[in-house]
């Protein structure tokens, strides 16, 4: 398979925001799929304070070619000042699934 596939992770303040933004990213073919995990507890430092709270985590699958457009759109839609956007390359997987991801992006 010549097209590389990425897994992107991002947290959201609640499931409703995660659903709304995920739907838009998939509808615009910037991601083939979004898996929403409704409750994760996050502990982090923000503006010199330790914060904690419940967030919604989303796994997005997308093609590497669409990485910049995905990141730009996610950042524009995201309610956080500095949203978590982490990419990792998928080195291997079921070829048919990886092809499906590639075919459903861009």
Image (cartoon, rainbow, N blue to C red):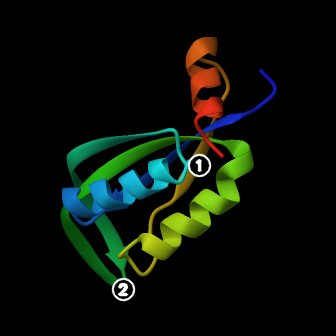
Decide which of tag 1 and tag 2 comes sooner along the chain: 2
**Relative to residue 52, is residue 46 drawn left or right?**
right
Above or below, comparing residue 52 to residue 81 in the picture: above
Considering every residue shown, the one lying at the far bottom of the view is 47
- Mark 2 Cα shell of 10 Å, populated few (<14), some (14-19), many (≥20): few
User: Element type at marker 2?
Assistant: loop
Percent of width and height locating residue 96: 60, 13
Percent of width and height locating residue 14: 21, 62
The answer to whether mark 1 and mark 2 are in CB contact below 8 A is: no
Q: From the image, state whether disc 1 or disc 2 is nearer to you.
A: 1
Percent of width and height locating residue 92: 64, 19
Quarter holding the N terminus is: top right
Residue that badge 1 annotates: 87
Residue at screen point 58% across, 24% down: 100
- Give the CA separation, mark 1 to mark 2: 26 Å
Using the rendered view, name the quadrant where residue 20 is placed.
Answer: bottom left
Residue at screen point 73% across, 33% down: 4
**Relative to residue 75, is residue 69 drawn left or right?**
right
Residue at screen point 42% across, 43% down: 59
**Relative to residue 36, is residue 54 drawn left or right?**
left
Q: Which mark is residue 48?
A: 2
Residue at screen point 66% across, 53% down: 67
């Amino acid at each position: 398979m010549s097209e590389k596939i990425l897994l992107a992770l991002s947290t959201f303040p609640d499931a409703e925001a995660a659903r709304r933004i995920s739907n838009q990213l998939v509808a615009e073919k910037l991601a083939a799929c979004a898996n929403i995990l409704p409750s994760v507890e996050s502990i982090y430092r923000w503006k010199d304070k330790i914060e904690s709270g419940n967030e919604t985590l989303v796994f997005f699958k997308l093609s590497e070619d669409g990485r910049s457009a995905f990141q730009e759109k996610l950042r524009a839609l995201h309610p956080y000042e500095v949203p978590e956007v982490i990419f990792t390359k998928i080195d291997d997987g079921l070829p048919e699934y990886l092809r499906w991801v590639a075919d459903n992006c861009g």
